[in-house]
Amino acid sequence: MKNRSAATAALTLTALLLLAGCSGGGSDSMPGMDHGGGATASATDDAAPQADATEADVMFTSMMIPHHQQAIEMSDTLLAKNGIDERVTALATEIKAAQRPEIETMQGWLSDWGAALTDGDGMHHGSGMMSDDDMQALDAASGTEAARLFLSQMIEHHRGAVEMAQDEIDDGSNADAVALARSIVETQTAEIAEMEQLLDELP
């Protein structure tokens, strides 16, 4: 009887210890598992949009958007004027037609990648961006002076875009972004040559 009682007590104690261990382990581990699982899912969700976009891709896209926006603003300023050579207005119209849909495409990429738009204010050096004074000068100009100023400013602006696009070609990984960069280099290099010729031909 004594041995049976001892055995029963030992089994009961063992069962209690096992039960406490399972309960304690479950209590300690479940929140940790939930937290860890949630954190992993969140990290995966956050990382997934950028899985196909490197820092170079994001930088190119976020900087090219305000760059394009300024080109459109410059074109709008010129197109609002009278007495401009029709070849120059045709070019400004082409620039708007090409760059507006590219802006929408790049904005979609940034949204898909979970990335923010870079502030264009930091792009004045080496990117071809016009200063406020440059934009005011274009706004104030008229006739042939405005046409010539637009062309000279847009040549500089395009050269900055070509440099930015070439950096993306060299360093980027996203296939769509690199393809757009190649298109920008090709299109805007041709437009630079066209604008240089127009500058020579304008009075």
Image: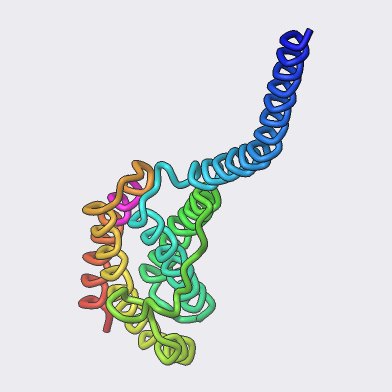
Residue 140 % position (x, y): 47, 92
Asked if residue 1 is positioned above or below residue 173 in the image, the reply reads: above
User: Of 193 and 178, which appears nearest the observer?
Assistant: 178
Asked if residue 179 is positioned above or below residue 56 in the image, the reply reads: above
View extreme (front): residue: 2
User: Of 146 and 130, which appears nearest the observer?
Assistant: 130
Q: Is residue 180 magenta?
A: yes
Picture quadrant of residue 135: bottom left
- Left or right of 123 on screen, residue 7: right
Q: Residue at x 71, y 13 (%)?
A: 7
Residue 26 % position (x, y): 68, 33
Residue 198 % position (x, y): 26, 72
Q: Residue at x 27, y 63 (%)?
A: 162
Q: Is residue 12 magenta?
A: no
- Left or right of 82 on screen, residue 154: left
The overriding secondary structure of the stretch rendered in magenta is: helix
Asked if residue 120 is positioned above or below residue 161 in the image, the reply reads: below
| Range of residues picked out in magenta | 179-184
Q: Residue at x 45, y 74 (%)?
A: 120
Residue 90 % position (x, y): 41, 64
Picture quadrant of residue 197: bottom left
User: Of 96 and 181, which appears nearest the observer?
Assistant: 181
